[in-house]
Image: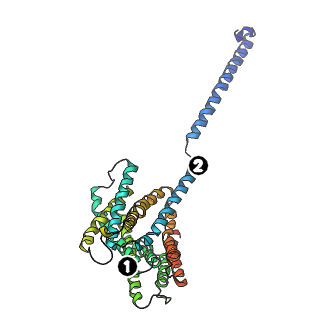
Amino acid sequence: MCPLAHAPKTQATRAAWTAHHHLQRVFHVCLHILPAAKHKKHEYLSSIPTTSPSPAAPAHTHRALVLIVAAMLIYGSIGVFRRHIPLSSAALACTRGAIGGLFLWGFAAFKNGTLRLGVEKRHILPLTLAGFVLGTNWILLFEAYRYTTIAVATLCYAMQPVILITLSPLVFGEKITLKKNTCVAIAAAGMALVSGIASGGAPQGALAATHVKGIVFGLGGALLYALVVIMNKKIHVPDIYGKTTVELLAAAATIFPYVVFTAGGSGGGAPFSLSVCVLALILLLGVLHTGVAYAMYFSSLDGLRAQSAAMLSYIEPAAALALSIFLLHEPFGAAQLIGAALVLGAALAHEVL
């Protein structure tokens, strides 16, 4: 039935009734539209990204922490493995670069779905040069492990950030600040205690020359590693896996002629004369301590801030120190322990403060 059937008959009341009827119709339409509009508004607001972290973010950060801590612990055990591999430092560095580079290349191919590395031709030469410096740095580090304790060699190598602080004004034009000078001075004092020069705890007699040689090799390795860091800062390659793969393979290729030239010399045997156990350790050093550790470290960077990653990297020398003292029972006095705290503390302070 039409609502106007019972409408009043006068003209004024009929007009009022008609207006009332239209208002009712508008009211009923609004009742149907508003819930739909409210639902659409809810869908729209739900689709807008917010600044609050997603529920998956804590899990992602936890995974990154596990990866970088595991990588640092693996790096920290390199000295122990080197002690049980009767191979020359050059041959060991060469095999480490070759095995680690091939493994990382395979990992990158599996991750990206292609064997092609994201490295342009113009970057091959500078990366090859950086790889040569990296391989030479390994040789010096392995020699440091041979001539002195793992703890002392590791702490000498841990001077790399301090050396980088010293070189940064010359290379990057950075200002020399009081904080930087203080960190360098504290690290130098700590190094004097670690070496035994300041505390009188250095080995005497024939061991003294060997100990000093190990310190020189360790500091030389730290200097070359600082140079590798500087070179990598100037080589801009977005594909970090491809960049590192080229450097590792270049390290092996550039060191190989020297290995062949010095074959038969002191410092280790030929690979074919090594036992199966030693060959397994060499393979482990290349795969686990290089390929796997690098892959874990790079994967962790996606879930960590740069400062957090820098701080956690000091787990490596701490682990090496613990293995040297508690596993190998190498001598390490109280003064050296204070020196270790000064060296690592100065480097860490520069990262944090």
Residue 56 higher or lower than 235, as above or below = above
Residue 85 position in % (x across, y down) = 38, 71
What residue sits 42% from the left and 59% below the top? 292
Task: Work out whether residue 36 or residue 93 is closer to the camera in this orientation and state it.
Answer: 93
Q: Which circle, 2 or 1, is nearer the viewer?
A: 1
Rendered image coloring scheme: rainbow
Q: Is residue 47 left or right of residue 102?
A: right
Q: Quadrant of residue 31?
A: top right
Residue 187 position in % (x across, y down) = 48, 79
The residue labelled by disc 1 is 217
Task: Work out whether residue 331 or residue 173 is closer to the camera in this orientation and state it.
Answer: 331
The residue labelled by disc 2 is 55
Amino acid, disc 2: Pro
Task: Work out whether residue 234 or residue 147 is closer to the camera in this orientation and state it.
Answer: 147
Residue 327 showing in the rendered view: yes
Q: Is residue 251 left or right of residue 214?
A: left
- Secondary element at tag 2: loop
What residue sits 44% from the left and 61% below the top? 293
Residue 3 position in % (x across, y down) = 71, 12
Residue 46 position in % (x across, y down) = 58, 40
Marked residue nearer the N-terminal end (2 or 1): 2
